[in-house]
Image (cartoon, rainbow, N blue to C red):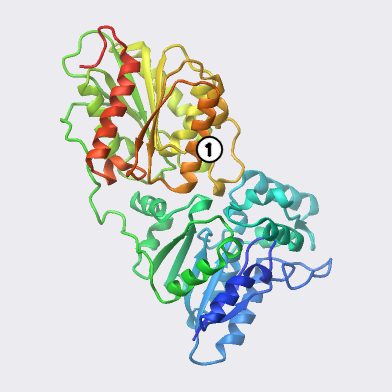
Amino acid sequence: MTVFILVSGVFTGPYVWDETAAALTAAGAEVHAVALTGLGAGRPPADAAVGLETHIADVLAVIDSVGRVAGREIVVVGHDYGIHPALGAADRRAESIARIVYLDSGLPENGVPALAAVPDQGVREEVLRAAGESGRRAGAALAPPSRDGWGVWGSTAGVSGAALDRLTALASPQPLGTLLQPLVLTGAAAELPMAGVLCTGNGSSVAMVQTRVGLGEPTLQALADPRVTFFELPTGHWPMLSTPAALAGTLLRAAAGEGHRLTPAGAEQPQPFLLDVPELPRERTGTIDLYPPPSATGPRPAVVLIHGGPVPREARPTPRDWPGMTGYARYAAGQGVVAVTVDHRLHSLDDYARSAADVAEAVERVRADPRVDAGRIALWFFSGSGPLTADWLGKPPPWLRCLAANYPIMAPLPNWGRFDARFRPSEAVAHAGSLPLVLVRAGLETAAIASTVDEFTDAARACGAELEVIDVPHGHHSFETVDPTDESREAVHAAVRAVLHHLCGEDDGSPR
């Protein structure tokens, strides 16, 4: 028999698992939803010091009670914050555990407190401020969100109004010690099979994780172990409330060792650009690669290609050497314009301001090159660099002739928490004036990213922006290297034609 030990996240208790537990029980499993002290096990005394170790002890007590019965395979499931006490307990009882399931959660590390996994910087600052004011006194806690505030902790997509009301009514303050006390791991849990269940409505997907693994992010390389599998659920961050039956089915499959397995970094060669474009010489200066057009005379218009992210600092090759970036650059240069790729420091969600400064500095260096017509520049953004478009949309310089974006993220994803208001393209586009915009939209985009694109296109059309949309109905994110189809090729041709038309105009600079 499979025994599921379910550990809930911040502010919540065993009640969130009611429907999922019922479905698992109906399928023949044994289920124990852990009541974490202060979060479903009753309020602790005001002078009680409740920390992460307290919650680890709560989970250990359940594991030990189950472990005394032979013939049972224990699967520990941690949702959100719950993965920290779940992992801490599994690490200390590794011999009793068959598998750990990470339910739309982060990957806790030894010595790192749960607060580091909170996506919202404002919440992190609030916790640290409250801890400083209280001197981390016993009983200090973070108040649960209001009914409309749960989105800061993750998307509530799919959760009914009644379920949200109940979630709010039963929520408990989160003891600060549970977020601030470092997690202590021996390493034993790292040897256990694991499964990740990703909620795509909250902004995560298997493809995103595979990309980060493929880029060589050190902390994620263990996810390519054959004992690690992944699943997706098309819902928000609270699948036990939005799709409890589907979650139960997924947990049963995870317990059986099913699921998608990732490819290790370096195991496969990067897919080439989908067009056969000729090799062209490039000049590398600092973070910039410049592709002069062959046989060009006089200053030429330039298109600056801006990669997405976040990209791990350790990623090799760096983005300007990715096939998509070099492919577009060679294609554009072959059409008679100067093409530029640039490495910018978008390594985490906190890096957008620094990345924006890198891009602005690179653009000025390009404009200062004597081979470049400083009055005719196009900026072309990809994927996670979408928020960077806001600076240019909000106050377009006169030399900016076109702004393009391929499968961009145009608003913070739900699992990003509150995000710097500076990087809101849907708000900035109202000030774009007559700046031509070219948007390449992937039809098979993840739902969370697609909704940000829809938000942007609605805002652009509402304010009368000059927006051209090029659709790739059967294209995925990064379709230029994952979908080498005629449809994708035509989309690339159409996008380059549109950008160069706005960049070069009808005069002697029109593309060849």
The percent coordinates of residue 14 (x first, y second) are 67, 71
Q: Is residue 188 visible?
A: yes
- Front residue of this view, candidates 381 and 292: 381
**Residue shown at the point (61%, 53%) measured from the top left:** 156
Q: Is residue 367 left or right of residue 204?
A: left
Q: Secondary structure at mark 1?
A: loop
**Residue shown at the point (16%, 15%) measured from the top left:** 295
The percent coordinates of residue 130 (x first, y second) are 75, 50
Where is 66 relative to 300, above or below?
below
- Front residue of this view, candidates 250 and 197: 250
- Front residue of this view, candidates 238 and 26: 26
Q: Is residue 128 visible?
A: no
Where is 23 relative to 12, above or below?
below
The percent coordinates of residue 332 (x first, y second) are 25, 24
Q: Amino acid at mark 1?
A: Ala
**Residue shown at the point (28%, 40%) measured from the top left:** 480
- Determine the image quadrant of residue 121: top right
Where is 417 relative to 80, above or below?
above
**Residue shown at the point (61%, 79%) measured from the top left:** 32
Q: Quadrant of the C terminus?
A: top left
Q: Which residue is mark 1?
A: 411
| Residue farthest to the right, as pictured | 46
- Determine the image quadrant of residue 193: bottom left
